[in-house]
């Protein structure tokens, strides 16, 4: 006790300097509970209490201490005296480092005598530094709940199954690689959390956990789960969290809850399946060939496929699907869409956001399994139209309403109404005409192919800034569009328009798109088509970044314009590269390709590689990103490879606006953007002397003339080092024939350096007498897209011209007689 008093400073100094500490500590002792983990010096208080009020402390049943406390080691030695202890919490995470992260506790072991706490039923050692499970834990005969999450455990003891009363065990966030076979002996275990470990397989004995109702295996390396788990425990298991490598689970008549590693959740109520049923699942990247989005739809998730297809359940199965946040999508709604085998249909959907994870979830109920995805669509209002007629309002704009008079139909029909609001600023930006105005765009549809028997009355608000008082009817046009929005007809003269102060009212007998325009333009249908298509497009930028530590790893991404800065900020610590591309416009679900060029190549056997180009599908709210390794056939020992990646449309849609599909400069009319990619030089390629490779010898050359400047043999060797895989294009632009290019390639087929030199010096010898050969070389480099080499040649020539003029001034000779004294530029 004297040693403890010295440690605690409980002599006269303690009594005089901290008179309130014991009293404060004593106030924490109530109802056989002692909660000291919320105090930074809780262990000191515990030791003070044990010294002064030992009789009360040994009766404590519930004790909480922080394992971040520096006096924890001394405190552990006292714990075996608490024979009545039922719950012991020694958690870390109560202290934070300079970056605000929780610090693990210092606990690495427990005193052996802890095993004598025969009343202990609950033990929490989470957020500590345990690398092995203390052996004394296996001697706790009453232990029911054990938590060792957020430690460094790599294995569990072989006799772990001796904890016969264990009902709850959590070992999440450790480093477990396997489990002992004895885990199957935990006969009363109900909840087992092994998530976020390194498990590669499970013992068959895990199937003996017949009372286990919740099993979390997510975040492991499991490629499969034992058959015994499906067969033996499926009837009892109510909630199963599957690892990312698993692709199936079993449902019985008892029902269950299942959570996939990707966050998708299922609830099968009791009786949903009459017999045991194996459910197979997978998530797929959306393919525009089968995922048909409607106009103005936005895809928010991957495709979930559930098999067996078409299986019908006795009760509705509930599905929760996570989806991308639609924060930028206003006046829209989120729905789950499913494929019936013939067409896609929308399900009744509820959405919510999880409080902790902030994830968005879409919830639906189904009686069948097939394909499912989450989309954002225009808000849809619908109603059934009986023979008595009815009234339908838009929830987006209550000023829009449709009146169905009595006798409008013989049989009840289902009618849907959608509205696309359009601001005056959007109209002005697209049309470049401040005088153009348009109402919200109204879409009406029905489930019948027969027109209505009586006219349906539609009320639309007048375009912004237009009222019944200042209305010039000659400028107001009512447009009717087909369901695909490809044609817009002016039907103003075909209907009777009535006006109020803020509304226009008209009657129709069939449904489609309707749009009010106020403009002085004559061809209103063409303008409306242009605006309609532009409203479906997204302004995007392409980025191409290389890892700072590994330049061969390239990240490509197509990013909506408003997300570019946040994305770059997030990546700037690990990646570097050029500025994003110029803005281009793309449709939701449009395919595009990325092609590496000028000495950069990729693995052509990739499944997403088509004719040497990487295939992408643009979805505005999904990550259009790929990270790949690139290589180069160019010898990088002597030079860096200055290549590029270009982005191309797969095809120009028929309905794309003319200004978005105009032909661009370059050989490919589908070109979108090009960004540079540079692979750094490894080491000098041709040695220290900068001479030609072994086996190559060229006569002295002086291309050009003294007045304009010479290119010498040394200059050409320097230029050759920078040519790379573009040598064939450059050779053709220099005037060499295809036959010459092929012969040079064949004769030097094992050596790219020799191919380049043979091409360049063959051209030089053929044109050595041409006074304009240097300017032709500069032009050929520019036409081949090698502005860098063209700039280098121009620099050489300028330096030569400067030296020539200096020599003229120095010797006082006339320009005509100065040829032999002219200087040539040397690199």
Image: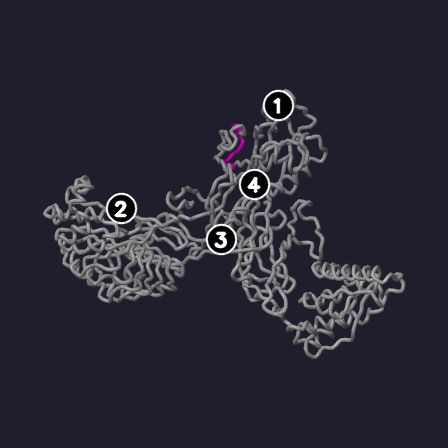
Report the mark closest to the observer, 2 or 3: 2
Instruction: Name the spot of residue 290 as percent of width and height, x first.
Output: 53, 53
Q: Indicate which disc, 1 or 4, sits on the residue closer to the N terminus.
A: 4
Residue density around tag 2, few if under 14, some if 14–19, many if 20 or more, within 10 Å? some
Q: Which disc is residue 426 wearing?
A: none
Q: Read off the residue under disc 3.
A: 341
Instruction: Name the spot of residue 188 as percent of width and height, x first.
Output: 21, 57
Q: Indicate which disc, 4 or 3, sits on the residue closer to the N terminus.
A: 3
Q: Which disc is residue 449 wearing?
A: 4
Q: Indicate which disc, 1 or 3, sits on the residue closer to the N terminus.
A: 3
Q: Does residue 454 lie above or below 191 as drawn?
A: above
Asked which secondary structure carries label 4, the reply is: loop
C-alpha separation, residue under disc 4 versus residue under disc 2 = 75 Å
Residue at figure coordinates x 20%, y 41% from the top left = 17
The answer to whether mark 4 and mark 3 are in CB contact below 8 A is: no
Q: Which disc is residue 40 wearing?
A: 2
In this rendering, would 80 be left or right of 797? left
Q: Compare residues 640 and 529 and report the one nearer the observer.
A: 640
Asked which secondary structure carries label 2, the reply is: loop
Q: Does residue 514 lie above or below 146 as drawn?
A: above
Q: Compare residues 631 and 270 and report the one nearer the observer.
A: 631
Residue density around tag 3, few if under 14, some if 14–19, many if 20 or more, within 10 Å? few
Q: Does residue 186 lie above or below 15 as drawn?
A: below
Q: Which disc is residue 467 wearing?
A: 1
Q: Indicate which disc, 2 or 3, sits on the residue closer to the N terminus.
A: 2
Is 72 inside the magenta-drawn segment? no
Q: Please identify the quarter of the rendering in which residue 139 is found.
A: bottom left
């Amino acid at each position: 006790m004297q040693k403890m008093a010295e440690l605690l400073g409980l002599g006269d100094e303690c009594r005089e300097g901290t008179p309130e500490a014991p009293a404060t500590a004593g106030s924490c002792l109530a109802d056989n509970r002692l909660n000291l983990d919320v105090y930074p010096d809780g262990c000191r208080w515990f030791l003070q209490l044990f010294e002064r009020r030992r009789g009360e402390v040994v009766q404590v049943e519930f004790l909480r201490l922080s394992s971040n406390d520096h006096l924890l080691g001394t405190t552990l030695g006292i714990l075996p005296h608490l024979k009545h202890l039922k719950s012991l919490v020694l958690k870390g995470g109560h202290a934070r480092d300079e970056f605000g992260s929780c610090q693990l506790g210092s606990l690495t072991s427990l005193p052996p005598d802890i095993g004598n706490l025969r009343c202990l039923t609950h033990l929490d050692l989470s957020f500590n530094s345990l690398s092995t499970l203390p052996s004394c834990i296996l001697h706790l005969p009453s232990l029911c709940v054990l938590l060792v999450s957020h430690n460094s455990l790599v294995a569990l003891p072989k006799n772990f199954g001796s904890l016969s009363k264990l009902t709850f065990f959590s070992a999440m966030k450790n480093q477990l690689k396997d489990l002992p076979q004895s885990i199957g002996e935990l006969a009363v275990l109900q909840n087992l959390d092994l998530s976020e470990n390194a498990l590669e397989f499970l013992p068959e004995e895990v199937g003996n956990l017949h009372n286990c109702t919740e099993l979390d295996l997510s975040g492991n390396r499991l490629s499969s789960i034992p058959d015994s788990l499906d067969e033996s425990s499926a009837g009892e298991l109510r909630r199963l969290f599957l690892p990312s490598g698993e692709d199936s689970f079993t449902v019985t008549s008892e029902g269950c809850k299942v959570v996939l590693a990707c966050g998708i959740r299922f609830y099968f109520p009791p009786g949903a399946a009459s017999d045991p049923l194996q459910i197979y699942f997978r998530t797929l990247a959306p393919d525009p060939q089968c995922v048909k989005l409607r106009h103005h739809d936005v895809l928010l998730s991957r495709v979930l496929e559930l098999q067996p297809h078409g299986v019908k359940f006795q009760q509705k199965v509930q599905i929760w699907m996570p989806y991308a946040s639609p924060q930028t999508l206003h006046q829209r709604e989120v729905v789950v869409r499913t494929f019936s085998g013939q067409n896609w249909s929308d399900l009744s959907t509820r959405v919510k956001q999880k409080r902790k994870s902030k994830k968005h979830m879409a919830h639906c109920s189904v009686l069948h399994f097939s394909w499912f995805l989450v989309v954002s669509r225009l808000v849809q209002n619908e109603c059934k139209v009986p023979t008595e007629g009815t009234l339908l309002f838009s929830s987006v704009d209550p000023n829009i309403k449709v009146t169905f008079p009595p006798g409008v139909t013989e049989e009840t029909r289902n009618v849907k109404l959608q509205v696309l609001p359009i601001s005056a600023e959007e109209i002005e930006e697209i049309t470049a005409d401040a005088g153009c105005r348009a109402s919200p765009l109204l879409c009406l549809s029905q489930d019948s192919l027969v027109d209505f028997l009586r006219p349906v009355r539609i009320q639309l608000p007048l375009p912004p800034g237009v009222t019944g008082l200042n209305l010039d009817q000659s400028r107001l046009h009512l447009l009717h569009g087909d369901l695909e929005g490809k044609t817009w007809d002016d039907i103003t003269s075909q209907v009777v328009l009535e006006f109020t102060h803020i509304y226009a009212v008209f009657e129709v007998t069939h449904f489609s798109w309707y749009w009010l325009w106020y403009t002085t333009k004559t061809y209103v249908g063409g303008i409306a088509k242009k605006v309609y298509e532009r409203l479906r497009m997204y302004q995007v930028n392409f980025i191409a970044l290389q890892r700072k530590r590994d330049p061969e790893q390239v990240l490509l991404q197509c990013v909506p314009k408003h997300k570019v800065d946040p994305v770059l900020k997030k990546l700037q610590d690990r990646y570097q590269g050029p500025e994003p591309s110029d803005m281009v416009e793309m449709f939701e679900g449009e395919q595009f390709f990325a092609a590496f060029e000028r000495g950069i190549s990729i693995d052509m056997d990739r499944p997403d590689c088509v004719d040497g180009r990487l295939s992408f599908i643009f979805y505005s709210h999904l990550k259009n990103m790929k990270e790949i390794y690139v290589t180069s056939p160019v010898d990088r020992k002597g030079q860096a490879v200055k290549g590029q990646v270009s982005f191309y449309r797969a095809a120009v849609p028929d309905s794309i606006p003319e200004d978005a599909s105009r032909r661009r400069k370059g050989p490919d009319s589908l070109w979108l953007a090009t960004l540079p990619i540079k692979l750094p030089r490894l080491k000098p390629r041709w040695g220290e002397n900068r001479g030609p490779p072994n086996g190559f010898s060229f006569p002295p050359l002086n291309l050009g003339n003294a007045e304009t400047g010479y290119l010498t043999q040394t200059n050409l060797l320097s230029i050759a080092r920078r040519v790379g895989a573009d040598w064939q294009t450059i050779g053709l632009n220099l005037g060499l024939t295809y036959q010459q290019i092929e012969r040079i390639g064949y004769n030097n087929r094992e050596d790219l350096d020799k191919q380049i030199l043979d091409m360049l010096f063959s051209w030089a010898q053929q044109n050595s007498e041409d006074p304009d050969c240097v300017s032709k070389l500069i032009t050929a480099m520019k036409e081949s897209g090698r502005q860098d080499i063209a700039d280098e040649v121009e620099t050489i020539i300028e330096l030569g011209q400067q030296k020539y003029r200096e020599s003229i001034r120095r010797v006082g000779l006339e320009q005509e007689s100065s040829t032999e004294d002219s200087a040539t530029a040397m690199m």
